[in-house]
Amino acid sequence: MGSNPRSELKQVELCCPSARHWGTKHTAAIERTMASRGYRRIGEARGNLPEVPEDEEDAMSIGPAAAAATTTGITAQRGGVMNAILEHRPFIYGYSLLLVGFAALAFTYIMQGQPSARSSSPSSSRPFDESASVATAGRNGLRPTPTLRLEGYDFIIVGGGPAGSLLANKLSEDPDIAVLLLEAGGESQHCLGGKDYTASPLTMFDIPLLWSTVAHQADYHWDVEGAMIAKTLGGCGAHNAMLYVRALPKDFDAWNLTDSGWTWEKALEQYKALEDFDGPPSPYHGQGGPIKTAPPLYVDQVAPYFLEACRVMGLPITDDFNAPNRRLGAAYYHFSIKNGVRMSAARAFLAPIIDTRANLDVVLRAEVQKVLFVGSKDGIFTATGVVFTSPEGDSREARLINPGSGKGSGNVILTAGAIHTPKILMKSGVGPKDKLSKAGIPVIVDVPGVGENLQDHPAIPMAFTLTTPLAARVGSAVGSFEELTQYRDWVVEGGEVLKTTMAQGSSSCGLACKTGSESGGGWSEGRFFPGEQPGSQQKDYAVFASTGFTAGAFLKSDKGSKNAKLQEDYPDIQLTVFPRVTEPHLVAAQQQQENADIAVAAGNTSSAADTSFSTSSQKGTMLVTIGLLDPQARYTVELSETDPLHGAVSLREVNISASEGRGFLSDLDISKLIWGIRNVRVIARTTPMTEAIQEESLPGPDLLDEGMLVDWVRENKYVNSHWCGSCKMTREDDPSGVVDPRLQVMGVVGLRVCDASVFPTIPSGNTHSTVLMVAARGAEFILEDFRG
């Protein structure tokens, strides 16, 4: 971890009492030495931009596929104090004795902090009062490995994704509150200690264009079939497409908890407080918050054709999907990208404090197995801590200082996501009694709703072949090695080139469109093309500062809704336009087909894949994905039948279809998706989209019959990995609920859930912003109760 010599002395003294005198004498010298080597604490770096040590300035590695945002070659770079010494070799011998002494102390400390021999019983956990040395997160690897606090913690947070990152920041603001954040994965972005450089100092997690590449790295994901669940510091915020789309007022009406404080007005307060919007002042946006949001810095080549076609056919053109009265229609998305680098919640909330707050411990590669409880005479169980698997592979315990309820009482807080939060609850004995008994898990409390009600935005793809000129422009905008170098230099220098370029465009529609004052008209008149061709005003290397796509639309079908709160002008279909096949779930299908093609060529016809994607069909192909925003479809989280305690969970589709066992999408779900297909076809036949595409390749222009389309939708639907709802928030008298309106798990004391699991129903758009809103409200509830 990055060094904070004064705050780390408290940790060092646990293993080396003599460190107090040594540290008092030499801390200032250490700080001067580190400063001379170019190391700075994160809070001191300009704009939180990555720093480039001299030995890493030219260390770059990118494969051709990485530049196309499909696969990438990664070269790990050496770092830390010893590399700074070896690479720079200071010539002032006066520092030599100091450095040797520092190394000797570090060696002594490390040896004394090593864990004892692993227990012979794989199910046993190390007693809390033993030294439990753990790997911790940090930027420069300068902070010695601390031990878990012997006295325990006020709050233990399980899961270092968006919600966990925010809670770790908010709860540790008070230096007297001890907070432990446990994350099962490792480092990700550079500012979080990541070293898997693509363009040093940037890792693949930093570069927005590589979002789809990251989504296919098995080492950074959980082994859950049919789902892409990030397993790294930052969670889904480290691999998603960075779209910033909020819930709408009627989403909160549908939660049926407005009388418990879950109103649109309360949510808007949090949305604005968390946001730093790079756009014109708006009553719906905040400025100065930790999460940077902005229109795209780079507009792809297909987006202007799509938006102009939507305008011509009469769809509203909006400048802000997040204004509740302007969601319906087509527009450029807003993104969470700052200075050309992914603005994950972990970057916003953890990077500035991870090396500086002595009361916050962040432990990586620590997979939580269960929550610990203690019973009471009245039969109510209280959470006292957690058991987790350490980086060394043995089980460790972390404990709360003061378990219980009331003023000064601590909490275990689950923020492991909508799939792994219910898994941890069930492994801890909190869940459906029948499931737990079948798995051989002692029942702490019977909560039938745990793992039920899991939701996503089911989607289907439509593909179109681009015209030759446009296909050539799209193909040339995948990013070359030279452009990657230019992009890296721009990021490190602070983005002055793109800032200059941005002044030529509109802050409300990105670089690729002019404002009404510049072009003689406004959005309603269609001003999406800059100059003569799309993208003519933007630098080629700016593609790396984008996700590679920029436009979409929210539509209202004519099919109605089963939820009375979601009628009238409420969108139920989301369109997203990809100039290339980069949607990660579909890239996986494409790879499956390519592998099958190779197998068939080798004579192994049994390996042929049944998928609509093939290598030949992807050349010069654009995608329009059709997402269903208010699905009836539901999943259930299931523990492994063969190894409930240690095996991977699975997702079971709950069959609610009226079509007698023909899949889990309801007839209403399917009818809405087919409505989406028919309307995308209308857009595709509208000028100027007719100048951009040649023909429909998926599902194909001949697939017109309703019955055939029903079958096609069932066979080709895919998940969006917008998982939520598996620990439903309800009033306490609702038997389907898991947490109450203050996010406390029902039936036990001292245990909360503060992630997407608690959503009663899925919001009408991407879920990341609403996860942060829920976590922020959860932090308020927790601190209110703690302070009495």
Image: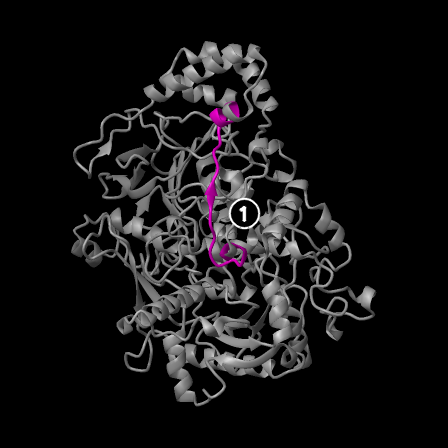
Whether residue 556 is visible, yes or no, is yes
Which residue appears at 56% of the width and 55% of the height? 209
Residue 40 position within the rendered picture, expressed as x and y whole percent measured from the top left: 59, 29
Of the pair 744 and 3, the residue shown nearer to us: 3
Residue 490 position within the rendered picture, expressed as x and y whole percent measured from the top left: 66, 45
- Magenta region includes residue 190: no
Residue assigned mark 1: 206
Residue 466 position within the rendered picture, expressed as x and y whole percent measured from the top left: 58, 75
Amino acid type indicated by mark 1: Asp
Of the pair 766 and 41, the residue shown nearer to us: 41
| 187 versus 452 height, above or below | above
Of the pair 384 and 695, the residue shown nearer to us: 695
Whether residue 306 is visible, yes or no, is no
Which residue appears at 61% of the width and 40% of the height? 49
Q: Give the range drawn in magenta.
A: 65-85
Q: Residue furthest bottom?
A: 705
137 left or right of 601? Answer: right
